Image: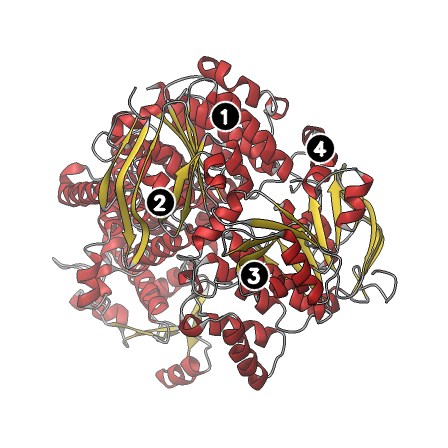
Amino acid sequence: MNTFRGFVVKEFRHIVRDRRTMVILIGMPLVQLALFGAALRNEIRETRVGVVGAVVDDVARGLAVRIDAAPQFEVVPLASPDEIEPAFRSGRVRQVAVFEPGFAERLARDGTADLQVITDATDPNTANTLLAYTSAIVASYQAELAAEGKIGGPAPAVGVRIVPEVRMRYNPELRSVVLFVPGLIALILMLVCALMTSITITREKELGTMEVLLVSPLRPAQILVGKVLPYLALSLVNVLTVLVVSRWAFDVPVRGSYALLFVEAALFTVCALSLGILISSRTSSQQVAMMIALAGLLMPTVLLSGFIFPVSSMPVPLQVVSHIVPAKWFLVIIRAIMIKGAGLEAFWKETLVLVGMTTFFLVAGIRSFKERLA
Amino acid sequence: MSGAREPVIAARDLTRRFGTFTAVDAISFDVAPGEILGFLGANGAGKTTAIRMLTGLLAPTSGTARVAGFDVYTQTEAIKRSIGYMSQRFSLYEDLTARENIRFYGGIYGLTNAAIREETAELAEKLDLGRALDQPIRSLPLGWRQKLAFSVAVLHRPAIVFLDEPTGGVDPVTRRQFWDLMYEEAASGVTVFVTTHYMDEAEYCDRVSIMVDGRIDALGTPGELKARFSADSIDEVFVRLARGRGVAAEASKRAGAPA
Amino acid sequence: MAASVVATELHKAYGSTVALGRVSFAVEPGELFGFVGPDGAGKTTLFRILVSLVVPDGGEARVDGLDPVRQYRELRRRLGYMPGRFSLYQDLSVEENLRFFATIFGTTIEAGYDLIREIYAQIEPFRDRRAGALSGGMKQKLALSCALVHRPKVLFLDEPTTGVDAVSRREFWDMLSRLRAEGITIVVSTPYMDEATRCDRVALIQEGSLLGVDTPAAIAASFDRPLLVVRTPRRLDALRVLRSYEHARSAWSFGEDLHYADTRDRVEPAEIARLLAGAGIPDAVVRPATAGIEDVFMDRMHGTAAPGAAA
């Protein structure tokens, strides 16, 4: 046990002595959080929305006022439908809401009225977001009207041709930072665990110290666990940092159980560590290990996990590939815990998949870590 | 030998400090064209720092030096064009073939394609490379690799070639063949500046300099040095100068300074 | 008492390259045994097989009575190993390195101190310095201390003196001589021929084969051709003349001198002096000499040398 403690102490020393890496490991989560949370968030601010036909109609005007009041939008009145085309083309507006003539009367009479929302889809992501915001505003206005009793009927509805976004139920303000934080945790864990582990093991191979370690009475498992344990600790510290900072700076809540969150994070961490071990067992230079970790692990974590692009909007072949990306499963779990406040019953399947993957990588990693040189 | 012609290296009080540690302490010497200078010293005596200053890689703290007629402070680019360099650790790209290495280094120094082709054929003949010319460097025996690395380092006919432990770990026969190559280059006017831990090789040099704790404690022909220290070999001279200095040097050294 | 290290027909090839070709030898307990040969001769492969890091393709080995292939767990407790490059953690201090290597062998610096005292005392003043900031000689001493701290029965040192200056090398061999007095079997490799004389016995190794195993004196004495030392300021010209002589076996530079070996059983120095004088080198001093390890090595190398290496 003393032997093992000595080993772990030495690993911690390596980490602490290497200031640059240390700064990266501790600072990276914060920088990433700032980037994704603030600078890169695809939240929309004061996008100009043209409104046609709301001038004389007080229900329509009420909606236009609420759209204008939302921080995302700024209403630009358009006199007639003829102005829509030029307004889009000149870039004066990104979205136009067209109220049908007699909007309020139809709503009062039929309980439904047409609102046509036209969006500039040059940038599809933004267009989707704009639509989502608008539909959220429409939905809340509709609820307001119903409460005031201004619309009657068994199924009061403002008939709008907008597909409601499912996520908005849990993220009513559609704040992208809430979605990014779980993805960010997955990314950081992958980076710290898989990348750093594979580098630290291959570094000993390059230095020649691995030869001495192998020739000592240390068992391979002791070497591996000793090497990865500090990174496991560091990763959980990073998870905590991200949660605290995102709560404090971006007001991102954790609705579910913290304990469950940490258990799942630890599971994913071990999964990433095993991948790191697997990579380093099969490579002998830091450079190769780094390239494999970056291309083989980080890119899929960013691109295929649903972190940035929803898995459901990917082409089918990529959806199939996404199943073997551990981060995809972890994202489902952690989003459920943080945003929905769900418990294990909601994602035991995903957890099982992660447990399976972890076991597989761990066994493969340890088996390919040789007690001898090639 | 020196003094007859304009020296190709002229150093005066050349000094380099790292913080409070003086790695090279006011060394002065001349090297004549076509001379082979053995640059000896214990580990940490300042050889590497001195070579880095002379090759334009490191600015001196004080003193002056001219290498191939160029100033080590202001004309480092011109110096780099006039010298060749080879070390035990790095010289050729291991994953490229001999031919590709020759082409690459020839290209760096601006040789024409025709000249590169000619040199390649000449080297293949001189070093008896045969089919090895088109094999990756890493598959060649160390001795060949070092001989080829030397030939590549002088491909562009530099005024001076710096050799940092070129024969480390090389078998005794190839080591001697390596020296034959050096003599050949020196005879054609190239100055050879060489470090080695083989003391018998020191005897092959025209002159030998021995650095101790950043200073040049002895400089002369092997015969002169042996006479001055009444020693039978340069090995004996070296041991007498350098013994016991290691710990003192270590103690005066600032932690973190390059060895 | 049984031999400390025994190798029987050890064989290892990497692809089509034979790293070690059916090598056999035995090292007695407490012996200081040297493998002398250039880089690429197979020394490192041999050491890695003996310390259980590489499994041989053929043949058998016993180290302290244990088979490195099957009994490697037990063997790893008993041996000390210093790989080719000084395998130290550059970012750890001198003391932290030593403490770490003591810990992984389940011991402490204090328990092993009397064995390493003499070596470690020289670096102890710098115990808080990072290993990366030490000079070559100091690193070498630290690496040796680390390999010794668990009191191994057999110590394997792979090229401990490569890249180290002549003075530090001498000091290192002095340390090894004293360690041998402690009863530790030491197996060491070196590319420096002159270091062979510091061993009890040496094996000359070249291209994966042993060129001979014996005491340094016996190896030197095995040079069976007459050897002359020639001293002249015109060394290169003299070499050319000697090599083209019809009875020449070899002629090589040896520091300030030339070594000339003849193919006949006897040769008079006067004959060679006359030969040189006839070629316009009148002032050569020629005298008989006894061969050294390097003479023998080069002589035996000839058959196996790489193409282009023949004189």
Using the image, determine if residue B235 lies above or below residue A36.
Answer: above
Picture quarter with the N terminus of chain C: top left
Q: Which residue is the site of mark 1?
A: C145
The type of colouring in the image is: secondary structure
In which quadrant of the rendered view does residue C245 lie?
A: bottom right
Using the image, determine if residue B125 lies above or below residue C178.
Answer: below
Q: Which residue is the site of mark 2?
A: C45
SS at circle 1: helix
CA separation, marks 3 and 4? 35 Å
SS at circle 4: helix
Numbered disc 4: what chain? Answer: B
Q: Which residue is the site of mark 4?
A: B249
Using the image, determine if residue A44 lies above or below residue A92.
Answer: above
Q: Which residue is the site of mark 3?
A: B177
Residue A373 at x, y = what percent?
31, 43
Numbered disc 3: what chain? Answer: B
